Image (spheres, rainbow, N blue to C red):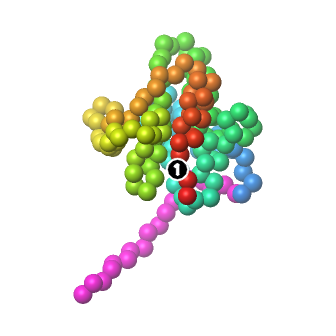
Amino acid sequence: GNSAYLRKRSLVFDHVFGPYSRQDEVFETLVKPIVDETLAGYNCTIFAYGQTGTGKTHTMEGVFSNPEEAGIVPRSVKTIFEQLERSGAEFTIRVSFLELYNEELLDLFDPFSNKKLQLCEDAKKGVVCQNLDEIPVLNVEHIFDILQKGVKQRQSA
């Protein structure tokens, strides 16, 4: 017969934030250590997942133009640029903006393209998305400008 096997799972949370948590608390507690690992050469990802209306956009983006309400992405961008500039090293930063919606991948910098995006594993780079646009950026303001253009292309329920 058709029987489903259910097993118990236990989940471990690094941290749970209350409804009145501030953007800076989330960034300093969870994201800043990941940004530091990225700058040390590790391939890192911050992924927001959940039902519509649960605060993913607020947490990830916040308000780009308001330092107090800036989310994970603008705070990470600012921190990365500040640390690279302080190091005195030469660097190049390229930005891509990918959305996964209803199991479809969409390049938010080129949303009307017929390019087939595909996630795959690269021995040197880790997980990469083939055919995803990468835009070279010059500074924090440049990133914020192009990200806000990409945000306007996002799908919403």
In the visual, does 6 lie left or right of 33?
Answer: left
- Disc 1 target residue: 155
Q: Main secondary structure of the magenta part?
A: loop
Q: In this view, does 138 lie above or below 116?
A: above
Left or right of 16 in this view: 36: left
Q: Work out whether 14 lies above or below 112.
A: below
Of 132 and 62, nearer the camera is: 132
Total marks shown come to 1
- Can residue 13 be seen? no
- Residue extent of the magenta highlight: 1-18
Q: What residue type is labelled 1?
A: Gln
User: Residue 13: within the magenta?
Assistant: yes
> Residue drawn 51% across and 60% down?
12
Residue at the spot 49% in from the left edge and 63% down from the top edge: 11
Task: Return the x and y of residue 56 as percentages of the image width and height.
Answer: 59, 51
For the C terminus, give its image quadrant: bottom right
Dot 1 falls on a residue whose secondary structure is: loop
| Residue 83 in the image, given as x and y percentages of width and height | 58, 22
Q: Is residue 95 left or right of residue 78?
A: left
Residue at 41 percent across and 31 percent down: it is: 133
Q: Residues within 10 Å of mark 1 (few under 14, many from 20)?
A: few
